[in-house]
């Protein structure tokens, strides 16, 4: 989307909320405010600069900590009154030292929540849970189920049955989460591996 600067910053005092998102993980990192000058500095320098409402001045994120936000893209929303900045962060973004100012919010959607549930089952091992049963039976059972579900996915793909393909893929992903949890791994570890491969291209 082409950002219309004149509509965004209709006068010199206009402040626009700017949502900052990690370009790789898509995690929402923070919310800041921009005026025309900070917007132009950000675009020209490649380092995200805001207007501080409390200090009444421009400030470049990381100017004291060196935890800069390097701009990858910037766009306005459909009403042209909010900005979305995709960035590559250097170090933690929150002043508390956390990766994000919104660490209580999952950014992995339902798969992230399912992963947390699998981890909880592994910790508590509640009776009557299928996940508990898999952990009790160990890696041989988990690996066998992974193989069975992978075959089911391939079968449905070969048949061209999209509905069944989605269904069986759900089973495969669930059992993959169990397998990863068994070894103390997570989707994040896979994501990091894929990011390394992508950066090497």
Image: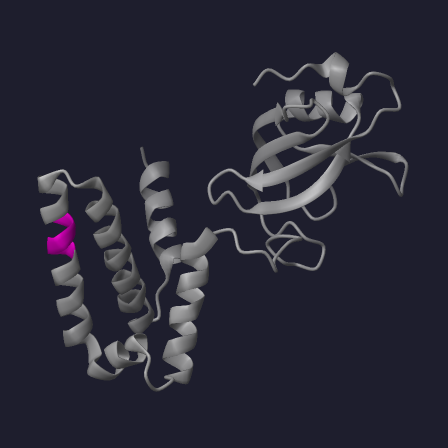
Magenta stretch contains residue 152: yes
View extreme (bottom): residue = 127
- Give the image location of residue 112, x and y in percent: 44, 58
- The magenta stretch spans which residues? 150-154
Is residue 141 visible from the viewing direction of this image? Answer: yes
- Give the image location of residue 184, x and y in percent: 35, 71
Left/right of residue 189 with respect to residue 31 in the rendered view: left
Q: Measuring 89% from the left and 41% from the top, which residue is drawn there?
A: 55
| Quadrant assignment, res 68 | top right
Quarter of the rendering occupied by the N terminus: top right
Left/right of residue 66 with respect to residue 194 in the rendered view: right
Q: Nearer the viewer, residue 114 or 33?
A: 114
Q: Is residue 5 above or below residue 23?
A: above
Left/right of residue 163 with respect to residue 127 in the rendered view: left
- Give the image location of residue 50, x and y in percent: 76, 34
Q: Is residue 130 above or below residue 173?
A: below
Q: Nearer the viewer, residue 190 or 118?
A: 118
Magenta stretch contains residue 117: no
């Amino acid at each position: 989307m082409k950002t219309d600067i004149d509509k965004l910053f209709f006068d010199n005092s206009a402040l626009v909320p700017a949502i900052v998102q990690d370009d790789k993980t898509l995690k929402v990192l923070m919310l800041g405010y921009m005026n025309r000058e900070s917007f132009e500095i950000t675009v020209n320098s490649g380092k995200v600069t805001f207007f501080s409402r409390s200090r009444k001045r421009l400030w470049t994120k990381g100017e004291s900590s060196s935890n800069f936000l390097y701009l990858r893209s910037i766009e306005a929303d459909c009403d042209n009154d909010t900005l979305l900045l995709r960035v590559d962060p250097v170090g933690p973004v929150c002043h508390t030292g956390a990766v994000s100012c919104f660490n209580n919010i999952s950014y992995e959607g339902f798969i992230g929540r399912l992963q947390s549930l699998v981890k909880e089952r592994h910790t508590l091992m509640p009776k009557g849970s299928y996940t508990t049963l898999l952990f009790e039976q160990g890696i041989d059972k988990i690996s066998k189920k992974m193989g069975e579900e992978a075959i089911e996915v391939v079968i449905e793909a070969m048949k061209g049955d999209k509905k069944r393909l989605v269904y069986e893929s759900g089973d495969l992903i669930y059992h993959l989460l169990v397998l990863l949890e068994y070894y103390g791994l997570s989707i994040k570890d896979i994501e990091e591996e894929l990011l390394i491969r992508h950066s090497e291209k």
